[in-house]
Image (tube, grey):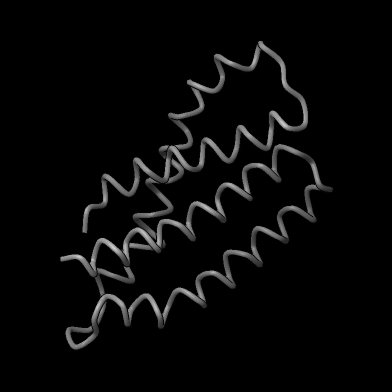
């Protein structure tokens, strides 16, 4: 399992989703430096989320389970919980653009990270 490459891809995906949503609401040229600085906290969020919520499913699997079986068994539950938490956060934020962009990027990035881990593990 190539965790660093998934974290790097997740950081790029998450930053792209976040800034596309933010810039669709209000774009200002003064925001451009923040795009580059935002990669540090975004990469830390991706690192923590992936290491503590996704990789344990693949690391702690039973010996008789394939990686595809782990994905099929646990991904639907993870997706339901993640969607519920993100949807709750959007509602509690009164649909403010910054929490929406953060939670949307978190949701889509975690879903894609599961797919990257499942595909990488099946190739090995």
Image quarter where the N terminus lies is bottom left
Task: Give the residue displayed 48% in from the left and 21% down from the top.
Answer: 36
Give the side of residue 102 with respect to residue 119, left or right.
right
Give the side of residue 8 with respect to residue 97, left or right.
left
Q: Position of residue 40 (x, y in %)?
A: 43, 29
**The image quarter in which residue 54 lies:** bottom left
Q: Is residue 123 above or below residue 69?
A: above
Q: Position of residue 45 (x, y in %)?
A: 46, 43
Q: Position of residue 86 (x, y in %)?
A: 65, 58
Image quarter where the C terminus lies is bottom left
Task: Give the residue displayed 79% in from the left and 56% down from the top.
Answer: 91
Q: How many numbered marks are there?
A: 0
Task: Give the residue displayed 41% in from the left and 56% down from the top.
Answer: 113
Of 54 and 105, the residue lying toward us: 105
Give the side of residue 17 with respect to residue 43, left or right.
right
**The image quarter in which residue 67 lies:** bottom left
Of 81 and 65, the residue lying toward us: 65
* Residue furthest out toward the top: 30
Q: Position of residue 68 (x, y in %)?
A: 31, 77
* Residue furthest out toward the right: 94
**The image quarter in which residue 74 lies:** bottom left
Of 13 and 102, the residue lying toward us: 13
């Amino acid at each position: 399992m190539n965790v660093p490459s998934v974290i790097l891809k997740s950081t790029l995906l998450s930053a792209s989703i976040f800034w596309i949503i933010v810039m669709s609401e209000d774009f200002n040229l003064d925001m451009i430096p923040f795009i580059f600085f935002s990669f540090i906290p975004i990469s830390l969020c991706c690192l923590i989320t992936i290491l503590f919520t996704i990789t344990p499913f693949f690391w702690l699997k039973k010996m008789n389970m394939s990686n595809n079986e782990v994905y099929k068994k646990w991904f639907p539950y993870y997706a339901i919980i993640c969607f519920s938490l993100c949807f709750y956060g959007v509602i509690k934020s009164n649909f403010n653009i910054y929490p929406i962009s953060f939670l949307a990027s978190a949701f889509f990035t975690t879903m894609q990270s599961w797919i990257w881990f499942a595909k990488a593990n099946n190739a090995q």
